[in-house]
Amino acid sequence: MRARQILLALPANLSVGDCLPSQPSTLETKTVKLGDPHDDSGGILWRGSIFPGGPKVKLQGSVHEICDQIYIRNPDFQPLTGYFKKHGTTNNVSKREDPWEWDNTLTNVQGIAGPDHFYQGHIPANWKYNSLKCAPMAMGYMPDIRRNSAILSSLPGKCGAPANSCRRMMCEQTTALYFCNDLDTQLDVDCSEAAEYVKQIWDNCCMRQMTTSGLTRSKEGFSIWVGYGNCNHDADVPPWEYKIGEGNNKMCKAPMSLFMDAKSKWIITAPGGIKGRNPAEEDRLHRERRERDRNPFGLPQKTGIPLPGDVDHCC
């Protein structure tokens, strides 16, 4: 059974996908998927409390849809973990820790597409995964990866997938994050922990460029994939279906890198005559090429139905 669609009332200034509290103004409705917790094909499984001290419930869908479902039920919901607790505001999403502040080098990084498509960086000494592989699938768009990683990090509760399955956690434009469960039983982890795995990919694979893809595999029996996504496809399409070189995000190349000069200004350098290209111009040119496979969220609609009270209680 597929996730069913219903119309739910949302504040006009509550954007789909941001797991942040917002003050209500005028009301309109948006189409939001309400996943069936017993359906194994409609996105990731989320387990957590919508109200402080309240019972845990199960929701299903993308992280954007789960955030919407939470805020519809509790507009005062405050993220308690992850990126926004540390940094305070979405305005800091583009800021990042310098990877060279970490003193331990990952030694088992693999780049199946060769050295042109991967960068070996540094990771914390206590990190818990077995391997990091760069360029295992088609490329995603770096700004969308980082923004969605921050949203995922802000979501309290557990994120997971059914046994032996992959689920798309988030999809925006032509970029997606995936959670794959390698075990014979359902598995979930803290959503903020899944976000940390995403961060290791964009910190170490094609670092500081506009596109990347990567795979981190955990000792706990799950893996996180980051790269291309077609938001019009079902949420259970596995990431390896999008082969390297496919999609409409260009390949990253290791010789291009971004350095910080003595005045702390970012400068793009690369062989081949593109030295000094403005990152904003690079971003604009890239977005002009990304008109297909866009996020299929519909326009606001003027009518809706009351919020159903059919959320399953769990654990």
Image (cartoon, rainbow, N blue to C red):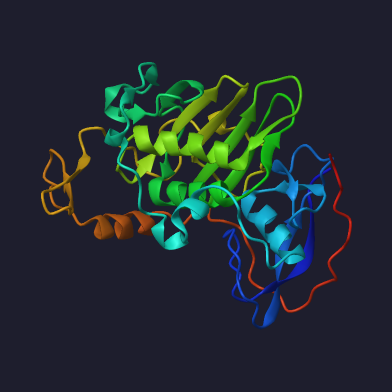
Quarter of the figure with the C terminus:
top right
Q: Is residue 92 visible?
A: yes
Q: Residue drawn 56% across and 33% down?
A: 239
Asked whether, in this view, residue 254 is left or right of residue 244, the answer is: left
Query: What residue is drawn where x is 11% and y is 45%?
Result: 273
**Which quadrant: the N terminus?**
top right
| Quadrant of residue 71 within the rendered picture | bottom right
From the viewer's perspective, is residue 16 above or below residue 210? below
State whether residue 173 appears in this view: no
Q: Position of residue 269 (x, y in %)?
A: 15, 43
Question: Relative to 134, does residue 38 appear above or below in the rendering?
Answer: below
Residue 45 shown left or right of residue 190 in the figure? right
Percent across and percent down for residue 31 are: 71, 65
Q: In this view, does 235 lie above or below 64?
A: above
Who is closer to the viewer here, 196 or 167? 196
Q: Where on the picture, by quarter, is residue 213?
A: top left
* Front residue of this view, candidates 65 and 239: 65
Q: Which residue is drawn at 67% across and 62% down?
A: 77
Place of residue 184 in the rendered image (x, y in percent of width and height, measured from the top left): 75, 19
Q: In this view, does 93 lie to the left or right of 187?
A: left
Image coordinates of residue 156 in percent, x first then y, are: 64, 48
Q: Which residue is drawn at 69% across and 53% down?
A: 66
Residue that protrudes farthest toward the top in the picture: 108
Q: Nearer the viewer, residue 179 or 243?
A: 179
